[in-house]
Image: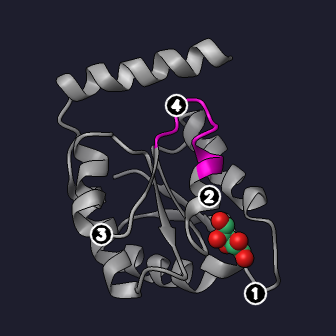
Amino acid sequence: MEKIAIASDHAGRELKEDIKEFLSSIGVEFMDLGVDNDNSVDYPDYGILVAERVSKGEVPRGILVCGTGIGMSILANKFLNVRAALVSDVYTARMAKEHNNANILVIGGRIVGKGLAREMIRTWIEARFEGGRHQKRLDKISAVEKKDK
Ligand code: RB5
């Protein structure tokens, strides 16, 4: 598994730190793109750092955390080739990969506990995209994305 880019705002930082510990414990490499303190920041400034890298193919996957996960997911899905999924249960985390081939997982640091976040991330990492009819559907989304450019 190649490196995962990870970032949060202040509201997601505590969970981000736990996620880093978890990724280390299962041997998954990551790059932490901030934030590195608890001062209030604007989540787009940090989400962009991950979404841009995933969009350009510099990293295959990213994880973003803000308070609810909503702002980070709205932001990330503005980027070409990004499929960001906001998840708060393990089933959705699995489907996010199997059906949607989500390349960014977004979690609400004020919503989801550490144990659940770990399980969702493990599940998303281990799941495999099913392709087939799901690829056809993603192609339709890509067509919309390209039309807007
Ligand atoms: C910050 O207070 C909060 O608005 C942000 O973390 C996030 O929840 C935005 O969607």
Q: Find numbered disc 3 in the image and state the secondary structure of the residue it sits on.
A: loop
The residue to which callout 4 is attached is 81
Q: Is label 2 within 8 A of ligand 1 (CB to nearest ligand atom)?
A: yes
Residue 138 at x, y = what percent?
A: 36, 26
- Ligand 1 resides in the quarter of the picture at bottom right
Q: Earlier in the sequence, mark 1 or mark 3?
A: 1
Q: Nearer the viewer, residue 119 or 2?
A: 119
Residue 96 at x, y = what percent?
A: 31, 49
Q: Find numbered disc 2 in the image and state the secondary structure of the residue it sits on.
A: helix
The residue to which callout 2 is attached is 72
Q: Which residues are magenta?
A: 74-83
Say which amino acid is labelled 2. Answer: Met
Label pair 1/3, CB-CB below 8 angstroms: no
Q: Earlier in the sequence, mark 4 or mark 1?
A: 1
Q: Earlier in the sequence, mark 3 or mark 4?
A: 4
Circle 3 or circle 4, nearest the eye: 3
Q: Main secondary structure of the magenta part?
A: loop
Q: What is the distance, in whole Å, between disc 3 and disc 4 at their CAs?
A: 24 Å
Q: Find numbered disc 1 in the image and state the secondary structure of the residue it sits on.
A: loop
Q: Which mark is residue 28?
A: none
Which quarter of the picture shows residue 123? bottom left
The residue to which callout 1 is attached is 38
The residue to which callout 3 is attached is 89
Res. 35 visible in picture: no
